[in-house]
Amino acid sequence: MAEADLDPLLVIEQYSFPTPWKRSMYESDIDANRHARFFVIETKDQHELVGYIGSWFIYDEAHIGTIATKQEYRGRRIAEQLIAYTAFQGIQEGIAYIVLEVRVSNEAAITLYERLGFTQVGLRKRYYTDTQEDALLMTCRDMEGMARRLDIEEVPDER
Ligand SMILES: CC(C)(COP(=O)(O)OP(=O)(O)OC[C@H]1O[C@@H](n2cnc3c(N)ncnc32)[C@H](O)[C@@H]1OP(=O)(O)O)[C@@H](O)C(=O)NCCC(=O)NCCS
């Protein structure tokens, strides 16, 4: 992910989350957090940023902290490809499993994660301080299977 990706990313961020991350949060992760891995997918012709994912790779764990797809591009396997690429990259770096939290009301995301092989391993009560909503903790250990889902012509940009 390049510095120039931040503006279009933040537009998607704004309408995708109840409490969007601020620019400074992305900047500090991208500039100063050696554990952070951000990847984006852009269209081939116009180089329009249509999806992004941010994870922290710590020891053998990849923790997905953010993922979103531009509204008009949803349902086209963009999020799937972002997670698959994170798994692909994770394997190169010794990652054994992926973990994430998701709001219990986020049916689209939960359906996606379950379809990709994530399983529910816990519930974090009132995890989201903005709405006091609970988080499902989900994990996937089949890194190879996840990486095999990668079927895009060009791999996403690495930051
Ligand atoms: C969740 C999100 C990232 C999914 O992105 P996407 O690129 O549309 O997802 P994909 O196309 O890769 O995945 C498609 C699969 O996800 C599930 N899915 C996606 N949107 C869905 C919806 N609105 N309702 C139910 N299932 C849905 C389905 O299983 C679908 O597979 P199918 O088409 O075979 O039924 C996207 O909806 C988004 O950006 N939401 C706002 C941000 C967000 O909630 N992020 C997750 C935080 S944990």
Image (cartoon, rainbow, N blue to C red):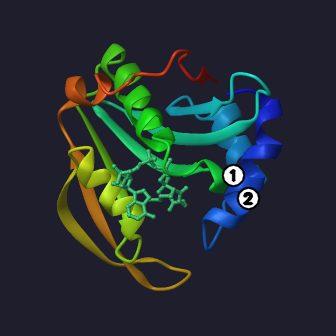
Q: Position of residue 43 (x, y in %)?
A: 68, 29
> Residue 150's quadrant in the figure?
top left
> Residue 144's quadrant in the figure?
top left
The amino acid pointed to by label 1 is: Met
Report the residue marked by disc 1: 25
Asked if labels 2 and 1 touch by Cβ distance under 8 angstroms, the answer is yes
> Residue 104's quadrant in the figure?
bottom left
For the image shown, how many numbered marks are present on the structure? 2
**Can residue 8 be seen?**
yes
Quadrant including the N terminus: top right
Q: Residues within 10 Å of mark 1 (few under 14, many from 20)?
A: few
- Ligand 1 within 8 Å of disc 1? The answer is no
Image height check: is 124 above or below 155? below
Report the residue marked by disc 2: 22
Quadrant including the C terminus: top right
Q: CA distance from mark 1 to mark 2?
A: 5 Å
Q: Is residue 4 left or right of residue 153?
A: right
